[in-house]
Amino acid sequence: SAVISQKPSRDICQRGTSLTIQCQVDSQVTMMFWYRQQPGQSLTLIATANQGSEATYESGFVIDKFPISRPNLTFSTLTVSNMSPEDSSIYLCSVKEGTGPYEQYFGPGTRLTVT
Amino acid sequence: AQSVTQLGSHVSVSEGALVLLRCNYSSSVPPYLFWYVQYPNQGLQLLLKYTTGATLVKGINGFEAEFKKSETSFHLTKPSAHMSDAAEYFCAVSDDFGNEKLTFGTGTRLTIIP
């Protein structure tokens, strides 16, 4: 199974600033995903990031607020822009090693607190 | 659209007792079904999955789940709870028609009573 790391593991940020979260995988993967987990809540998919194409955003999430890069098959970044306290969440990246009946593997998450 | 319902946001069982976590799904196409576990301050770890074939699926740490199409259920069980099983458990669904997204349930927090 893929091993996924995320940086930073946690951060405390000021309102109005931006934070870029990195996701690194130890093998080449087809698909990468970014999720948000608000305090005490389940996971909500933000977007799907495929190499060589624009990210696909879910309803309620927009590129201006959550720009994503996917420069190669082992790396992706998610930026949380113009942050407000409502953005305080855990952000997780996940990967899928192929289309079809394959599971997603998750990184350890980035715990973001906005003050 | 797919959806997942987990009955019981909090479940408490005594150490050594049966663990039963409930998951019902809604999907218009044959689903892939997953159970993930999240320990405090960690990411999600896959417990088990159902794609096709045998409907009783065995996973890690002694957990198993049974896919029941007629009941649209995928309940998670473990015969004997251990203190280390205390965690948050998420049921998730995707479909096999090219939709790679996972839809998660709201989660069940499992507490083990010594």
Image: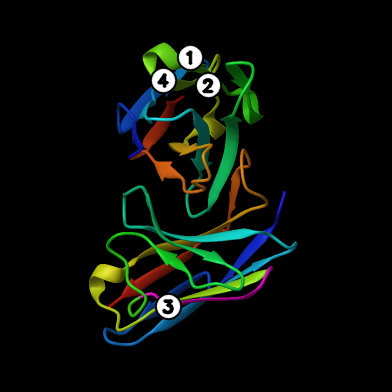
In the displayed structure, A23 sits above or below B95; it is below
- Between discs 4 and 1, the one toward the N terminus: 1
Say yes or no: labels 1 and 2 on the same chain.
yes
* Residue that mark 3 sits on: A67
Q: Are marks 3 and 1 on the same chain?
A: no
Residue at 38% x, 14% y: name it.
B71
Residue A7's quadrant in the figure?
A: bottom right
- Residue named by callout 1: B18
- Subunit bearing disc 1: B
According to the image, label 2 marks what residue? B81
Residue receiving disc 4: B73
Q: CA distance from mark 2 to mark 4?
A: 22 Å
**Magenta-highlighted residues:** A66-73
Residue type at mark 4: give it.
Ser
Q: Residue at x 38, y 23 (%)?
A: B22
Chain identifier of the residue bearing label 3 in the image: A
Against B46, is A6 above or below?
Answer: below
Contact (Cβ within 8 Å) of mark 3 with mark 1: no
The residue under the point 37% across, 76% down is: A63
* Residue at the extreme right of the image, as rendered: A27
Q: Which amino acid, by three-letter code, is at mark 1?
A: Leu
- Mark 3 belongs to which amino acid? Pro
Give a yes or no on whether discs 3 and 4 share a subunit. Answer: no
Task: Categorize mark 3 by other alpha carbons within 10 Å: few (<14), some (14-19), many (20+).
Answer: some
From the viewer's side, name the closer residue of A106 and B50: B50
- Whole-angstrom CA distance, mark 3 to mark 1, is 45 Å
Residue B28 is situated, as x and y percent measured from the top left of the image, at 38, 30
**Residue A4, x across and y down, in percent:** 65, 61
